[in-house]
């Protein structure tokens, strides 16, 4: 039985004091989620990670939005896994479409990062998803298959189980134009099939989230689908009221 999961991707939003206010205000809703067997988390910017980690309830997962795969060195502007680990961060979002588009993050680089995170006993949240053009050409499945295969390249089934996947069609991110629950389920079930082909029964344990204009008003639809284990949410995760609405939607 896969545990439901909600992760808020804060992108380049919130200053440290704003992030701290969210962390201090989310205790009751995190307790409520935990009481219902749901994992919940947020992905603040690097400069907000410590403020959230120090002020949030311990059950709130705090994820970085990126990391480097090397432990240290001449990589100006980068953040390493040991740096994150030392401040108590154990999850990292990888391969978000915005980082793929603006920062040249490829699935092959994500694979290096995934291996480094797993070696550090941390959890990668690996994103995949197609552009509108790819969707309209009917090539979504071939596209995400490549992203999944390159991201998971060289892993054992035991390692694969520790990864969380997010399927986020780019045309649905921040556009208000969410994928229907049928489209989301169809692609996510396909992704699970690709994982099954490579890792056998371990695929049933891998959590796969949907992301793309998820709101408190539509999250229940996605959660009604058998292969969708939760949501990766941008805009609607920024305010406490809306975040609470998302948690309530996951509860059912
Ligand atoms: C995201 O950033 O991962 C995302 C899904 O954004 P939004 O919920 O705003 O579409």
Image: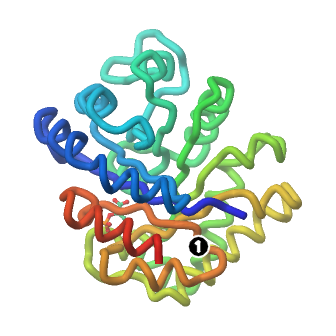
Residue 15 in view, yes or no:
yes
Percent position (x, y) of residue 235? 24, 63
Q: Say which quarter of the image contains residue 186.
A: bottom right
In the image, residue 79 sits, relative to residue 41, either above or below, namely above
Q: Nearer the viewer, residue 228 or 37?
A: 37
Residue, disc 1: 228
- Left or right: 25 in relation to 68: left
Viewer-closest of 152 and 16: 16
Expressed as whole percent of the image width and height from the top left, the position of residue 180 reads 45, 88
Compared to 4, does 98 lie above or below? Answer: above
Q: Residue furthest top?
A: 73
Q: Quadrant of the N terminus?
A: bottom right
Q: Is residue 128 visible?
A: no
Give the residue displayed 61% in from the left and 78% down from the top: 187
- Left or right: residue 19 versus residue 112 is left
> Dividing the image into four equal quarters, which quarter contains ligand 1?
bottom left
Where on the picture, by quarter, is residue 149? bottom right
Residue at 71% across / 48% down in the picture? 152
């Amino acid at each position: 039985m896969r545990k439901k999961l909600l992760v808020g991707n804060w992108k380049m939003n919130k200053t440290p004091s704003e992030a701290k206010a969210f962390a201090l205000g989310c205790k009751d809703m995190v307790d409520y989620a935990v009481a219902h067997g749901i994992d919940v988390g947020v992905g603040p910017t690097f400069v907000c990670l410590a403020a959230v980690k120090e002020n949030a309830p311990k059950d709130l997962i705090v994820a970085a939005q990126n990391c480097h795969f090397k432990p240290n060195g001449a990589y100006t502007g980068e953040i390493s896994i040991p740096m994150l680990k030392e401040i108590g961060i154990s999850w990292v979002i990888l391969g978000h479409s915005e980082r793929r588009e603006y920062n040249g993050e490829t699935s092959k680089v994500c694979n290096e990062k995934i291996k480094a995170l797993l070696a550090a006993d941390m959890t990668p949240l690996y994103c995949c998803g197609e552009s509108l053009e790819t969707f309209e050409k009917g090539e979504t499945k071939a596209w995400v298959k490549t992203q999944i295969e390159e991201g998971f390249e060289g892993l054992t089934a035991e390692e694969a189980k520790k990864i969380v996947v997010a399927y986020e069609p780019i045309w649905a991110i921040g556009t208000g134009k969410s994928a229907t629950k049928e489209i989301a389920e169809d692609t996510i079930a396909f992704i699970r099939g690709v994982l099954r082909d490579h890792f056998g029964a371990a695929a049933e344990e891998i959590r796969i989230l949907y992301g793309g204009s998820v709101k408190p008003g539509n999250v229940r639809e996605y959660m009604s689908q058998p292969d969708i284990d939760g949501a990766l949410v941008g805009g609607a995760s920024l305010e406490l009221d809306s975040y609470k609405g998302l948690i309530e939607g996951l509860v059912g």
